Image (cartoon, rainbow, N blue to C red):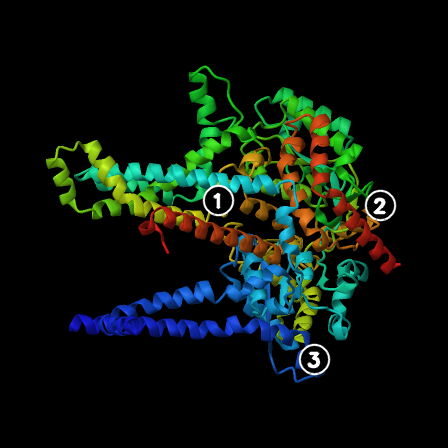
C-alpha cells in the first residue's frame, strides 16, 4: 500500500504537467456527465415545475409502466436489440475488411478513397432518408422504375411492406457507418510493427496468410473494446435511422419501431418529462448491466482483452 | 524548458477559462429550486399596485413565428415600448421558430428563466398546465384588477373556456373559433374545364352536398387524368366529420357536433366507416396519389404547379383568399357540413403567464394593453406603418412599397395574436372580415363540452400505446389503401387491447366531473 502511494507520488512529481492537462477533460466529464446525475429522480416523480425536480411528488415506477404494459413492448425491445446486435456484427466485419484494404493501398488515391468512404457518415439522416426514397419510392423510385422492370419483376410497394426493412436498414446503416468505424481499425493496423510482416514474408507467408494470421489477431483487442462499448448502447437505437429512413410509415412499424421511436411517437402529444426520463433510465440501466456482463465474459475467456 | 513553461501556461489558461465558464453557469443551475419556491409566494410588488409609474418594469414576451425572430424585431419592440411606457412597462420580444419554440420554452421554464408572457401556440397548453408551469390568472383578482379590458375584448364565455379544473391559466385570443367542417378547395380552372359553374359563395364557401362533390371529382378525374384529383391529409377525417375530438385526439369523441356529453369510440361509428369507404373508393378510382403516404410536398406548391386539382380542409370566412394567396391560382371552396365550435377550439393556444414571471402585475398590465390597443396590435401583427406595411384608402393593409412576403422586416402569425380583430384587415379580404368572423363564431353549432379541457396524465400509458397503434394504421386506412371493412376492426381490436376503452372512460369521468362543477 505504502509502496503504491509512493509510486503515485513519484508519478505525480514526474508527470505533473500531463496531469494538469488532464484536468479540463476531467472537469468536463464531471460537469457534463456526473453533475446532472441526481436529476435521475425525475423518472420516479410526477414532475411539477413549480415544485421543482426534487420537490415533486414520488410516484414510484408509474412512469415506467408505459414501456412494458403494451402489446408493442415485446416488438420494440426485440427490434432494438436484434438490430443493434446485427449492426455490431455487420459493421465490425465490413469495417475490418475496408480497413485492411485501405491499409494495403499506397499512393495518391488512398486519401481520396478514405474520404469517399467517410462521406456517408457526414450526410444528415434526413437527406439519407430521401436518397433511400429516390431508390424505393412507388411512383418515381429507381428500383421500381428501372431495376425491377429490367429484371422482369413487378414493382414492390416498399413503404408498405414491413418484411423488406430489416435488410434495407442494415444496408443503409452499414453504408453510413462503416467509413467512420474503419478509422479506428485502420489506425490500429498502421500501428502494427512492420518488421513482423517482413519476417512473415521471409518465412514465405502469402498476403492472405499475413492478413489472417497477423492482422486479424492483432486487431482483436480493438474489436473487443469497440464491441463492448457498442453493447453498452444496445438498448438505444439510432433515432434518425429508424424514424427518417422508413419515413415514419405506419405499416412498417412491426420491423422499424424501436424503443426510441416508440417513446417519441407516444410522448409527442403528452410532452411528459418524467416519462421520457424513465425511458432513458431504463435504457442506460440495461446497457450498464449488459456491458458489465459482457466484460466479465470477456475477462473469463481472455483476461488481457477485458476493459476492467 | 520553454516547451514545459508553455505547456503549463496553456493548461493554466484552459483551467481558468473553464472555471469562468463554470462560474457563470452556476446561477442558472442553482436557480430553479430557489425560484421555484419563490414563485408560489406572490411577488412583493403586488401589494403596492399604484406605485409610481416612473418605475419601468420589464416584461419578457415569448412566442413563435413561422420563421423565427424577424430582422426588425428590435425596431418594432422600441415602437411598442414607447406606447407601453404610459403603463410603466417595457417589453422584450423573444421570438422563436416553430421547431425550436416548444423546446426553448421547456428549457427556459424548467430552469426558472424569466418569461412573463407566452403564446402557447405549438407549446401544448394542457401539458403546460399539468406540469405546473403556469400562473393562476385570477389569484388575488389579478385579471379583475388589471385586465378588465381583456374580458371585454374576448368575452367572459371564451375566457371561461380556458379554465382547467376551474382555474384560469390562459387567455383566449380573438380569431375564428368555429370551423366549417368538410370543406374542399378546388382549382377554379379545373371547374371551368369540366363546365361547372358554382353557386354563389356565402362568406367564401359554396354549400353543396357530398353527392354533388363526388360528381365534380369524377368529372375532374375524367378530364384531367394526369392530375392528382384530391389530396387528403392526416387531419382530413378530423376536419370532415361531425364529431367533437375531446382533448384534440380521436380516442373518444362526442358525436353529432357534441350535442350530448356521451363519449364514444370513433372507430366503431358508422361515420368513420363511411368516411374510410369513401376515401377507399377515391383511391380505387385513382383520385389519390399512390405516393401520398410518403409525399410531404406542400399542397399549395403542387396546386400552383398544376399537379393537384384540389384538397380537403376546414373552412372559415377569408379561407378562399388564404388558398388563393397560398397557391397563386384561383380557387373555389366548397363546404359540405356545418360550422362548428368544438370543445377544445377556444383553449387551443391561449396566451399564458408562466410561473417564472418577475412581476405578474406589470405582465397583466401589458396583456390588458395588447388586447385593447389598436396601435399596439398593428405593430405586433404587421410592424411599423410606412416601413413594413401601408394602409390603403379603403382601410385595408398591404405591404409597403418594395416590400413583399419574402423580404418584409417584421411579421408574426396574425391569427395567433391576442386580439387580431383590432388590426387592419389585409388586402384581398372583405373589409368586413372581423365582423364576418365574429358572426361565424356566434352562429356556429357549439359543443356541449365547450370549455372542457382534458387532462391526459392519468392515462398517459394508454395514450402512448394507442397513439402508436393509430400511427401504424392511420395512413393505410384513411388514405384508402386498404379495405376498411377488414382494416378498421383490426385496428380497433388492437387499440382496445392497448387501452382505448380506458381513455374513453377517463374522458367520460373528467367530462362528468366538469359538467357537475359548471352546473
Work out how far the residue at label 1 is from the one at label 3, CA to CA, in angstroms: 49 Å
Q: Nearer the viewer, residue A5 or A210?
A: A5
| SS at circle 3 | helix
Q: Position of residue A51 (x, y in %)?
A: 65, 69
Residue beneath the point at 52% across and 56% down: B68
- Give above or below for B246 relative to B418: above
| SS at circle 1 | helix
Q: Is residue A287 left or right of residue B191?
A: left
Dot label at residue B262? 2
Q: Nearer the viewer, residue A291 or B111?
A: A291
Q: Which of the two discs, 1 and 3, sits closer to the camera?
A: 1
Q: Position of residue B228 (x, y in %)?
A: 59, 28
Q: Position of residue B438 (x, y in %)?
A: 77, 53
Image quadrant in which the C terminus of chain A is located: bottom left
Work out how far the residue at label 1 is from the one at label 2, CA to CA, in angstroms: 41 Å
| SS at circle 2 | loop
Q: Is residue B261 visible?
A: yes
Q: Which of the two discs, 3 and 2, sits closer to the camera?
A: 2
Look at the numbered discs 1 and 3 and tell me whether their residues touch, using CB distance below 8 Å: no
Residue farthest to the top?
A: A152
- Give above or below for A175 relative to B166: above
Q: Residues within 10 Å of mark 2 (few under 14, many from 20)?
A: some
What residue is pinned by disc 3?
B46
Q: Position of residue A138 (x, y in %)?
A: 52, 27
What residue is pinned by disc 1?
A240
Amino acid at each position: 500500500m505504502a509502496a503504491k502511494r509512493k509510486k503515485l507520488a513519484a508519478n505525480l512529481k514526474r508527470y505533473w504537467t500531463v496531469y494538469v492537462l488532464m484536468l479540463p477533460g476531467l472537469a468536463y466529464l464531471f460537469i457534463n456527465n456526473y453533475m446532472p446525475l441526481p436529476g435521475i429522480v425525475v423518472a420516479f416523480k410526477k414532475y411539477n415545475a413549480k415544485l421543482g425536480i426534487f420537490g415533486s411528488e414520488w410516484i414510484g415506477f408509474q412512469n415506467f409502466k408505459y414501456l412494458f404494459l403494451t402489446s408493442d413492448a415485446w416488438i420494440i425491445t426485440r427490434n432494438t436489440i436484434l438490430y443493434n446486435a446485427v449492426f455490431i456484427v455487420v459493421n465490425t466485419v465490413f469495417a475490418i475488411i475496408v480497413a485492411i484494404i485501405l491499409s494495403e493501398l499506397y499512393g495518391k488515391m488512398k486519401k481520396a478513397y478514405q474520404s469517399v468512404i467517410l462521406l456517408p457518415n457526414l450526410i444528415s439522416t434526413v437527406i439519407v432518408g430521401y436518397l433511400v426514397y429516390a431508390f424505393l419510392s412507388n411512383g418515381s423510385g429507381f428500383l421500381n422504375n428501372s431495376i425491377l422492370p429490367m429484371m422482369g419483376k413487378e414493382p414492390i410497394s416498399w413503404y408498405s411492406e414491413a418484411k423488406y426493412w430489416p435488410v434495407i436498414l442494415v444496408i443503409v446503416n452499414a453504408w453510413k457507418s462503416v467509413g467512420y468505424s474503419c478509422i479506428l481499425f485502420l489506425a490500429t493496423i498502421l500501428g502494427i510493427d512492420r518488421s513482423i510482416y517482413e519476417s512473415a514474408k521471409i518465412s514465405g507467408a502469402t498476403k492472405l496468410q499475413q492478413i489472417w494470421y497477423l492482422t486479424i489477431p492483432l486487431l482483436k483487442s480493438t474489436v473487443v473494446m469497440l464491441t463492448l462499448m457498442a453493447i453498452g448502447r444496445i438498448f438505444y437505437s439510432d433515432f434518425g435511422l429508424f424514424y427518417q429512413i422508413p419515413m415514419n410509415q405506419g405499416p412498417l412499424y412491426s420491423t422499424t419501431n424501436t424503443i426510441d421511436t416508440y417513446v417519441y411517437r407516444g410522448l409527442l402529444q403528452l410532452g411528459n418529462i418524467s416519462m421520457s426520463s424513465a425511458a432513458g433510465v431504463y435504457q442506460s440501466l440495461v446497457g450498464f448491466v449488459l456491458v458489465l456482463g459482457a466484460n466479465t465474459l470477456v475477462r473469463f475467456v481472455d483476461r488481457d482483452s477485458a476493459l476492467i | 524548458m520553454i516547451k514545459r513553461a508553455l505547456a503549463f501556461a496553456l493548461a493554466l489558461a484552459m483551467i481558468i477559462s473553464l472555471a469562468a465558464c463554470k462560474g457563470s453557469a452556476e446561477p442558472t443551475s442553482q436557480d430553479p429550486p430557489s425560484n421555484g419556491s419563490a414563485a408560489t409566494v406572490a411577488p412583493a410588488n403586488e401589494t403596492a399596485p399604484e406605485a409610481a409609474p416612473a418605475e419601468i418594469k420589464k416584461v419578457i414576451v415569448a412566442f413563435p413565428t413561422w420563421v423565427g425572430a424577424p430582422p426588425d424585431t428590435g425596431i418594432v419592440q422600441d415602437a411598442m415600448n414607447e406606447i407601453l411606457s404610459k403603463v410603466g412597462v417595457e417589453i422584450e420580444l423573444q421570438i422563436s421558430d416553430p421547431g425550436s419554440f416548444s423546446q426553448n420554452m421547456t428549457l427556459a421554464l424548467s430552469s426558472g428563466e424569466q418569461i412573463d408572457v407566452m403564446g402557447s401556440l405549438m407549446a401544448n397548453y394542457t401539458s403546460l398546465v399539468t406540469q405546473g408551469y403556469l400562473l393562476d390568472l385570477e389569484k388575488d383578482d389579478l385579471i379583475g384588477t388589471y385586465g378588465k379590458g381583456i374580458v371585454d375584448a374576448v368575452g367572459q364565455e371564451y375566457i371561461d373556456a380556458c379554465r382547467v379544473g376551474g382555474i384560469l391559466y390562459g387567455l383566449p385570443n380573438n380569431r375564428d373559433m368555429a370551423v366549417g367542417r368538410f370543406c374542399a378547395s378546388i382549382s377554379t380552372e379545373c371547374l371551368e374545364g369540366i363546365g361547372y359553374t358554382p353557386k354563389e359563395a356565402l362568406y367564401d364557401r359554396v354549400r353543396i352536398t357530398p353527392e354533388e362533390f363526388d360528381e365534380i371529382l369524377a368529372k375532374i378525374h375524367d378530364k384531367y387524368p394526369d392530375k392528382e384529383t384530391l389530396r387528403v391529409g392526416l387531419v382530413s377525417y378530423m376536419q370532415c366529420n361531425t364529431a367533437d375530438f375531446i382533448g384534440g385526439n380521436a380516442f373518444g369523441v362526442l358525436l353529432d357536433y357534441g350535442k350530448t356529453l356521451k363519449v364514444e369510440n370513433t372507430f366503431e361509428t358508422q361515420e368513420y366507416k363511411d368516411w374510410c369507404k369513401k376515401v377507399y373508393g377515391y383511391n380505387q378510382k385513382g383520385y389519390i396519389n399512390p405516393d401520398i403516404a410518403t409525399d410531404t410536398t406542400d399542397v399549395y406548391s403542387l396546386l400552383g404547379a398544376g399537379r393537384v386539382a384540389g384538397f380537403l380542409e376546414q373552412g372559415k370566412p377569408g379561407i378562399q383568399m388564404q388558398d388563393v394567396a397560398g397557391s397563386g391560382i384561383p380557387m373555389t371552396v366548397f363546404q359540405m357540413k356545418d360550422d362548428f365550435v368544438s370543445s377544445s377550439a377556444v383553449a387551443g393556444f391561449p396566451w399564458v403567464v408562466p410561473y417564472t414571471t418577475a412581476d405578474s402585475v406589470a405582465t397583466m398590465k401589458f396583456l390588458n394593453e395588447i388586447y385593447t390597443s389598436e396601435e399596439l396590435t398593428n405593430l405586433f401583427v404587421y410592424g411599423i406603418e410606412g416601413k413594413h406595411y401601408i394602409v390603403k384608402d379603403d382601410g385595408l393593409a398591404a405591404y409597403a412599397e418594395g416590400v413583399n412576403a419574402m423580404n418584409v422586416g417584421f411579421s408574426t402569425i396574425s391569427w395567433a395574436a391576442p386580439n387580431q380583430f383590432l388590426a387592419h384587415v389585409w388586402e384581398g379580404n372583405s373589409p368586413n372580415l372581423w365582423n364576418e368572423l365574429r358572426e361565424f363564431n356566434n352562429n356556429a353549432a357549439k359543443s356541449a363540452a365547450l370549455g372542457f379541457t382534458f387532462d391526459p396524465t392519468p392515462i398517459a400509458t394508454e395514450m402512448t400505446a394507442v397513439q402508436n397503434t393509430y400511427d401504424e394504421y392511420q395512413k393505410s386506412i384513411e388514405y384508402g389503401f386498404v379495405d376498411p371493412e377488414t382494416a378498421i376492426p383490426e385496428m380497433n381490436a388492437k387499440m382496445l387491447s392497448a387501452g382505448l376503452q380506458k381513455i374513453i372512460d377517463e374522458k367520460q369521468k373528467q367530462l362528468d366531473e366538469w359538467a357537475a362543477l359548471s352546473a
